[in-house]
Amino acid sequence: MPELIRYEVRDRVAVLTVDNPPVNALGPGVPEAIEAAVARGCADAGIDAIVLIGSGSTFIAGADIRIFATIKNREQSLERSESIHARLMRIEDATKPTVAAIHGTALGGGLEVAMSFHYRVMAPDAKVGQPEVLLGIIPGAGGTQRLPRLCGAAMAIDMCTAGKPVAAQQALAAGIVDQITGPSLRDDAIAFAQSKVGAIRKTRERSERIASRDAGIAACAAARAALAKTARGVKAPFTAVDAIEGAFTLDFEGGSLRERELFADCVMSHESRALRHMFFADREAAKVPDVPKDTPVTKIERAAVIGAGTMGGGIAMAYANAGIPVLLKDVDDAAVLKGMATIRKNYESTVAKGKMTAEAMARTLSLITPTTAYDGFEHVDIVVEAAFEDMNLKKQIFADLGRITRPSSILASNTSTLDIDEFAKASGRPRQVIGHHFFSPANVMKLLEIVRGKETSKEAIATSLALAKRLGKVGVVVGNCFAFVANRMLAYYMREALLLLEEGATVPQIDNAMTEFGMPVGPFGMQDIAGIDVGWRIRQFLKSIGKTRAEGPQSAVPDRLYEMGRYGQKTGAGWYKYEAGSRNRIHDPLVDQIAAEEAATRGITRRAVKDEEIIARIMTALANEGARVLEEGYATRASDIDAVYCYGFGYPRHVGGPMFYADAIGLPTVLARVKQYREQCGDYWQPAALLEKLAAEGKSFN
Ligand code: 3HC
C-alpha cells in the first residue's frame, strides 16, 4: 500500500506530504493518516512545528466525491460527519503549531482541513474555495463554522453559496490565509512554522469576525433574499446560509451539530445525486474508449472560421476569448463587415455590463481578422466551416480547404444536420475532417458536440477534446447520425410540445411548465429566439430527402406561422407577440386558434392538459430517444447524453440530464409511460429496445 502521508523532518519541523493522486482527495484513510502524522509530530521531542503540504499539482481537492454515493441514509451521514468533525477538532488541538501549505487548490474538505490547522500559507497562484454547493451539498467538515470565524459573514456566505474559489490575494485580505509565499512554498511554509513556535491559534476559538450576532443574522437574511432571485430550483445555497447563520447564533458545538444535520439533508437529496452525477459526466465525456489518453494532440495556435453569420461570428469569438488568433472569412466585404459589427456590439455590451475591460475587448477583437479570401489559410491549424446548411456549398468549401490548408490542419464543420462523411470525401483528407457542432450563442453555450466521421483520425478527436477544454467548453464525442445527438433528441422534445399544444395545452402553459421544471426557456420561447424560419428551412430540406425530424405526427402549426411571416422575436411575432424593441413574450390567442384548427384537421378532441403530463411526456420522449441513440452507438454512454442536454440546451444540472432523470424515476415507470402514451396518443410511441431490456433487467441507463 502506498503511504497516503509522507512524514519527513526538516530543521525541527515535521513536513507531512499528502500523496493521494490525482488530486489528494480525502479518500478512505487520508484524514486518519493526517491525524496520526500530526499526533506523531506532537509526540516527537525533536519537532517544534508541523507543516501539511500536498504532492503533485494540488493541495487537497476535498472529500472524495465518490464516497457520498455510499451513504445509505441520514443516520449514516450524521455518524460519518460526527466522526470527521471530531477528527478535525483533535487535529486542531495539536500541542505544536500546525501550518497548512496550499498550492493548486484547497477545495471543500481540503480547505476545511486547512482551517483546522493553526495557520495557512499559500502559493501566489493557488486558490481556496468551498464548492460543495455545486455538488448539491454544503461544507460538511466544519467549513460553515470555521470559515466565518476567519473571514466574516459576507465572504463566507459568498464562498459557500456561489462555490467559486478565491485567489490568494483575496484570501489573504479576507483573513482566510496568513501569508502568500515566494517561489518555494515548502521552504517558506517551514520558515513560517518556525516563526510560530509557541503560538498556537485555533480557528474554532476565534471570535472577532463573528462578534456581532445581529450583523450575521442580517447578512444571512440579505443572502436569502438575493438567492431567491438567482438560485432557482436549487436548495443547497439556501441550506449553506442556514448553516452559516449557526456560527452567529450558536456556539461552535451547536453550529457544528446544525451543520451535520443540514449536510445530511443535502447529501440524500436528488439535487446532490444529480449534481454529483454531472461532475463525473463532465469528466467521463472526455474519455473515448478507442482514443487512448496518450493520443498525440495538435496544438492549435491559429484558426480560421468560414461564415461570419451568427454561428461563425460566435465561434470566432470563442477562439479569440481563448487567446487564439482567428481569420473570419465570408463571401464579400458586406457580409464580413456585418459579422464584425455584430461581434463588436457583443463585446461592447459585455464591457457595458462591467464583465470585460475596454482594453481586454480591444485585445480580443484584435485577434479576429476579417477576410474575403483564403489568404493565410495555409498557416492555420484548424478551420471551422460555419456556412449555410447547403450540402453542395459545404462540399465545395471542403474541396477548397483540402487543397489550400496544410495536410495536418483539422477541417471541422459546424453543420447541425448534414453528413460529415460527405465533406470528408470532398476534402480528399477524410482523417482530418470532423464535426464541431457549437450551440447558439457559440461564445456562451458550453457544449461542443464533436462528431466523428467514418474515417476521422484518433488524433483529430483527441485534438478536438483538448481544444474544447481550451475554449472553455465541454466536448462530447458523438456519432454521425442525422442531427447528431443534441438536435436529434431536441426534435422529440419539440414533437411532444407541439402535439400537446394541438391536444389543448397553450404555448405559455407548456413553456411555463418547462421553466418550472428548470429549463432556462420553454420550447416555444426557444424557437422564437432561434427563428421559426430556421426550423422551416430544415423541414424543407428533410422533405426533399423524404425524412422527418422526429417519427410521429408532424404538426403543421409551425409551418403556418412561417407562412404568416411570424419568424419569432426578429419579426415581432412567432409563438408569442412582441412589442417593438421588447423581448417580453405576450400570449397570442391567434396561435391557440391555429392549434385548434390543426387539431380539428387531425381529428383530435381538445382537452385540458395538466402541467404534470406536459413534463412527463416531454421527458419520456427524450429518454426514449436517448435510449435509441445509445443502442445505435451514437453516444458512448448515457452520461454523455446528459452532458449534451445540460450544456447544449440548459437542461438543469440539478435534475441531472434526461437519462439520469429517467433513472431516478425508474426505467419500469418510464417504459410504462411509453406504453400508456401509445394507447393514448398513437403508435408513434414505441419503446426503445434498450429501454425495454434495461427495465426488464432492473438496470438503469447510468
Ligand atoms: N473526489 C474524487 N475525485 C476527484 C475529486 C474529488 N474531490 N476532484 C477531482 N477528482 C478526479 C476527477 O474525477 C478526475 O478523475 P479522472 O481523471 O478519472 O476523470 C481527476 O480527479 C482530475 O480531475 P479534473 O479532470 O477535474 O482535473 P483538473 O486539474 O481540471 O481540476 C480540480 C482539478 C480543480 C481539483 C477539480 O477536479 C475539482 O474542482 N474537483 C472537485 C473539487 C470539489 O468539489 N471539492 C469538494 C468536494 S465535496 C467536500 O469536500 C465535502 C466536504 O465539505 C465534506
Image (cartoon, rainbow, N blue to C red):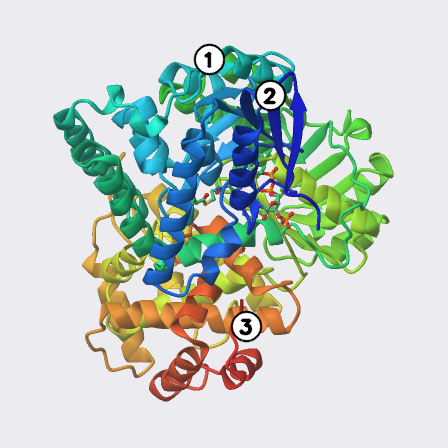
- Amino acid bearing label 1: Ala
Q: Which residue shows up at 49% across the image and 49% down it?
A: 647
- The numbered mark, 3 or 1, whose residue comes first in the sequence reads 1
**Percent position of residue 178, x then y:** 44, 16
Going by the picture, which residue comes out furthest to the left? 214
Name the foreground residue: 226 vs 161: 161
**Which element is circle 2 on?**
strand
The answer to whether residue 556 of the structure is visible from this angle is no
Tag of residue 627 = 3
Q: Residue at 29% across / 23% down in the picture?
A: 206
Q: Determine the image quadrant of residue 304.
A: top right
Residue 229 appears at what percent x and percent y?
23, 39
Residue nearest the viewer, comparing 219 with 359: 219
Q: Quadrant of the C terminus?
A: bottom right
Residue 185 is at least partly visible in this image: yes
Q: Are marks 1 and 2 in contact (CB under 8 Å)?
A: no
**Circle 1 sits on which residue?**
358
- Residue 539 placement (x, y as % from top left): 51, 62
Q: Which mark is residue 13?
A: 2
What is the crowding at mark 3: few (fewer than 14 residues within 10 Å), some, or many (at least 20)? many
- The amino acid type found where label 2 is placed reads Val
Measured Cα–Cα span from mark 1 to mark 2: 49 Å
For disc 2, the neighbor class at 10 Å (few under 14, some 14 to 19, many from 20) is many
Q: Front-most of 383 and 252?
A: 252
In the image, the residue with mark 2 has its CB under 8 Å from the nearest atom of ligand 1: no
- Secondary structure found at label 3: helix
Disc 3 from disc 1: Cα separation: 47 Å
Q: Nearer the viewer, mark 1 or mark 2?
A: 2
Q: Residues within 10 Å of mark 1 (few under 14, many from 20)?
A: some
**Mark 3 against mark 1, which lies toward the viewer?**
3
